[in-house]
Image (cartoon, rainbow, N blue to C red):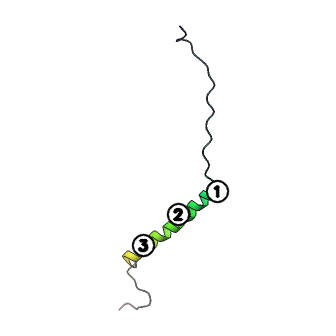
Amino acid sequence: MNDNVIKFRKKEAPKPPRQTPPWMRKALIIGGVIAAFLVAFAYFYITGDPSGMTVGTPTP
């Protein structure tokens, strides 16, 4: 019988966003920087000098 009645209810409070601990954020940043250097090193190790120029030898 009460199916047509509008029920006014308070909205649920929004959940606060989850915060990452400062130590985890710092560890992720350091890990990302180390990973970037490792990827760059692996790229240059596999492909060689990207410019094709050699240092210290004159070009003919």
Q: Position of residue 8 (x, y in %)?
A: 61, 19
* Residue at 40 percent of width and 91 percent of height: 58
Please name which of the two marks, 1 or 3, marks the residue nearer to the observer: 1
Measured as percent of width and height from the top left, residue 19 is found at 62, 49
In the rendered structure, which disc, 1 or 3, sits on the residue that comes first in sequence? 1
Q: Cα distance, mark 1 to mark 2?
A: 15 Å
- 26 relative position to 49: left or right: right
Residue at 56 percent across and 12 percent down: it is: 5
Question: Is 56 in front, or is 5?
Answer: 5
Residue type highlighted by circle 2: Gly
State the CA–CA distance, disc 2 to disc 3.
Answer: 15 Å
Classify mark 3: helix, strand or loop.
helix
Residue 50: in sight, yes or no? no
- Please, is residue 53 above or below residue 34 in the view? below
Residues at badges 2 and 3 in contact (C-beta under 8 Å)? no
Which residue lies under the disc numbered 3?
42
Relative depth, front residue between 16 and 44? 16
Element type at mark 1: helix
Q: Which residue is mark 1?
A: 22
For label 2, the SS is: helix
**Three-letter amino acid code of the residue under disc 3:** Ala
Residue type, mark 1 in image: Pro
Q: Which mark is residue 32?
A: 2
**Relative vertical location of residue 40 with respect to residue 23 in this rendering, above or below:** below
Between 59 and 28, the residue placed more toward the observer is 28
